Image (tube, rainbow, N blue to C red):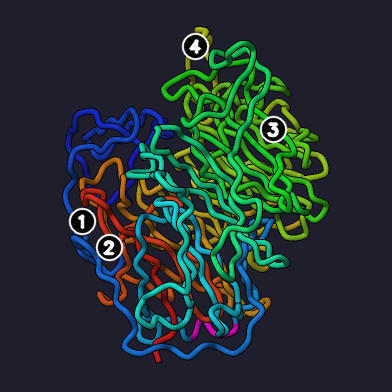
């Protein structure tokens, strides 16, 4: 994709030679003043860029941020029922914790709020932390934050008391002789990339690990861990296998098989006793469903069994969703988006938003009318995630082209000229242009391309969506009578190539709303910067998003670790949690960290 670099770019570039971008990015041309930067390819770094100048919202990168435990333990809060058992708070992926009674727009400021401590992790954590209140572990009651790493390790930490930094428990999902799958993207390992999910009723956490055995065999495993002990439940783990009939180029004797080229990045979903697991990065995307109680496979769907993808990456129908995951409504319907690929209303489901059941039957769908252009230009719909509007009559999604789709769940609209089947479509930012692309069959296709891209998911509060794009600010969109209207924007912008942001909102019912934004800045594996920079946590008044309440860049002691793309903060019981990188990729065995922020006492 191509887009001009606005004045908000963190640096003006002179001419650079070609460099490699993230494996799911496309060829990108940037113009800044009269200079031009061209990036193409995958999994590499471009030429070095100048270090950014220090400012309140742009801290100087440090060689290796150090965890800073609180001077003294903070007391455990009063009993609470707040839980965050799944990605983005709930199965609708609303990103709203409306039971936050401690953090308010009055006390979240640079003098009274900040970094309390950091827990060291054995590897990077691309997965969102999960949180449960009042668990009894090791004979005592704790509020517990869980985090999983690319070393295929799972930690349970006391959410309030740092102590000596030791976890309540730590479990490795690797078996004897295993190592995490060597990573291409993410680097340097892909042991556990997706956000797990917790069944609160049974105290079980479900996770998917990727590993290589001592004999060189790659596999994916589905795990069920007891969250009190960290031990595998009976019958866990199970090795994931999947195959379907097909005739595309990866078929062998008429069968396509899930293989180790895939990446299980999309967050897991647990709905009505069924687990949903999405795969991307392989020649064709996959969606699997499993019975959560028995860990037996229910159904398998391949998103392009008969038609190859084409272009720079060649994938077809991958389930990416910007680190997010499939969403579910109260009736058990499941919604997900797919990446670049051919579309024919089934069985090929490229660049579409699908509604499926536990058997993975596609019961309805929406596909942009210019899907062929999106595929040709690597502007896939699945670059960003899906949020069901609370009330669950509509969903909102967006992709690399920068277009937002508001879809009615009862009738998703399928594919119609000019997206007439959608309730509404609009570009995040002005300046979209009509462009063309030549397909692998020599056909010229046309579509619209915006100036920004979605790599995240919206969050909800009091009738409004809060959405971030790359590059650009976080914007508020008000939903009224089934129609979105753009409102205010933050003064601060998300940097190009930081892969956007997914906001999280905390509130006390309909009041005291705070929009929390994690700016990855120059994340590890940034395709432009030669070295990463610390992430920046920002908080905004949800009633006036122009009002910046707090930035971690305001105090040096509040600086978190280096940014990791697609990660997001969560908020519970007066604390904010998010994962960052303690070490850059240049370290032989880089560690991660879990940063914890709250009120200073």
Q: Residue at x 45, y 19 (%)?
A: 311
The residue labelled by disc 2 is 58
Q: Nearer the viewer, mark 4 or mark 1?
A: 4
Q: Nearer the viewer, residue 475 or 524?
A: 524
| Residue 315 image position (x, y, % from top left) | 51, 25
The residue labelled by disc 3 is 300
Q: Rounded to the nearest whole Å, what is the CA distance between mark 4 and mark 2? A: 43 Å
Seen in the picture, residue 435 relative to 288 is either above or below; the reply is: above
Which of disc 3 and disc 2 is earlier in sequence? 2
Query: Is 235 on the left or on the right of 414, as rendered?
Result: left
The residue labelled by disc 1 is 52
Which of disc 1 and disc 4 is earlier in sequence? 1
Q: Nearer the viewer, residue 48 or 478?
A: 48
Tag 4 secondary structure: loop
| Residue 320 image position (x, y, % from top left) | 54, 40
Q: Are marks 1 and 3 in contact (CB under 8 Å)?
A: no
Q: Nearer the viewer, mark 4 or mark 2?
A: 4
Q: Rounded to the nearest whole Å, what is the CA distance between mark 2 and mark 1? A: 7 Å
Residue with the most extreme top position: 442
Q: Nearer the viewer, mark 1 or mark 3?
A: 3
Q: Nearer the viewer, mark 4 or mark 3?
A: 3
Q: Rounded to the nearest whole Å, what is the CA distance between mark 4 and mark 3? A: 29 Å
Is residue 465 visible in this depiction of the protein?
no
Q: Residue at x 19, y 38 (%)?
A: 47
Seen in the picture, residue 536 relative to 456 is either above or below; the reply is: below
Q: Residue at x 26, y 58 (%)?
A: 583
Which of disc 3 and disc 1 is earlier in sequence? 1
Q: Rounded to the nearest whole Å, what is the CA distance between mark 1 and mark 3? A: 47 Å
Q: Are marks 2 and 1 in contact (CB under 8 Å)?
A: yes
Q: Which mark is residue 440?
A: 4
């Amino acid at each position: 994709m191509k887009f001009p670099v606005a004045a908000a770019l963190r640096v003006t570039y002179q001419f650079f030679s070609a460099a490699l971008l993230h494996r799911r990015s496309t060829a990108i041309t940037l113009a800044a003043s009269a200079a031009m930067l061209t990036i193409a390819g995958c999994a590499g770094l471009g030429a070095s860029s100048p270090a950014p100048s220090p400012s309140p919202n742009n801290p100087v990168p440090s060689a290796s941020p150090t965890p800073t435990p609180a001077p003294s333990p903070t007391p455990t809060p009063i009993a609470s029922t707040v839980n965050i058992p799944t990605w983005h708070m709930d199965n609708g992926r609303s990103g709203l914790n409306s039971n936050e009674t401690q953090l308010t727009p009055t006390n979240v400021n640079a003098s009274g709020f900040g970094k309390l401590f950091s827990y060291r992790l054995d590897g990077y954590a691309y997965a969102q932390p999960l949180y449960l209140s009042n668990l009894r572990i090791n004979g005592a009651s704790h509020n517990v934050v869980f985090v999983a790493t690319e070393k295929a390790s799972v930690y349970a930490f006391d959410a309030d008391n740092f102590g000596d930094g030791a976890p309540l428990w730590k479990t490795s999902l690797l078996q004897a002789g295993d190592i995490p799958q060597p990573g291409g993207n993410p680097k340097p390992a892909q042991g556990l990339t997706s956000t797990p999910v917790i069944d609160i009723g049974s105290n079980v956490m479900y996770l998917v690990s990727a590993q290589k055995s001592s004999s060189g065999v790659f596999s994916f495993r589905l795990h069920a861990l007891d969250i009190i002990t960290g031990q595998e439940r009976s019958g866990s783990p199970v090795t994931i296998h999947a195959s379907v009939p097909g005739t595309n180029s990866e078929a062998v004797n008429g069968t396509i098989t899930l293989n180790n080229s895939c990446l299980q990045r999309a967050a897991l979903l647990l709905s009505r006793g069924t687990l949903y697991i999405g795969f991307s990065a392989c020649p064709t995307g996959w969606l699997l469903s499993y019975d959560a109680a028995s860990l037996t496979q229910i159904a398998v769907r391949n998103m392009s069994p008969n038609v190859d993808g084409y272009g720079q990456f060649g994938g077809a129908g991958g389930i990416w969703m910007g680190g997010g995951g499939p969403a579910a409504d109260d009736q058990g319907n499941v919604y997900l988006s797919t990446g670049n690929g051919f579309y024919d209303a089934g069985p090929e489901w490229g660049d579409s938003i699908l509604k499926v059941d536990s058997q993975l039957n596609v019961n309805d769908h929406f596909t942009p009318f210019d899907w062929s252009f999106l595929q040709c230009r690597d502007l896939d719909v699945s670059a960003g995630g899906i949020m069901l509007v609370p009330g669950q009559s509509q969903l909102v999604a967006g992709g690399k082209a920068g277009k937002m789709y508001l879809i009615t769940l009862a009738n998703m609209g399928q594919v119609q000229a000019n997206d007439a089947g959608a309730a509404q479509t609009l570009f995040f930012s002005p300046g979209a242009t009509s462009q063309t692309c030549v397909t692998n069959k020599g056909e010229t296709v046309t579509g619209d391309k915006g100036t920004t891209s979605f790599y995240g998911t919206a969050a909800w509060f009091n009738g409004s969506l809060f959405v971030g794009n790359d590059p650009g600010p976080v914007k508020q969109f008000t939903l009224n009578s089934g129609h979105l209207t753009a409102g205010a924007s933050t003064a601060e912008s998300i940097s190009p190539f930081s892969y956007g942001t997914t906001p999280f909102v905390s509130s006390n019912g309909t009041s005291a709303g705070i929009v929390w934004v994690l700016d990855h800045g120059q994340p590890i594996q940034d395709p432009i910067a030669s070295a990463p920079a610390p992430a920046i946590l920002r908080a905004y008044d949800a009633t006036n998003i122009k009002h910046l309440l707090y930035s971690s860049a305001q105090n040096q002691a509040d600086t978190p670790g280096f940014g990791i793309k697609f990660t997001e903060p969560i908020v519970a019981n007066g604390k904010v949690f998010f994962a960052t990188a303690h070490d850059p990729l240049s370290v032989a065995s880089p560690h991660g960290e879990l940063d914890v922020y709250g009120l200073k006492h």
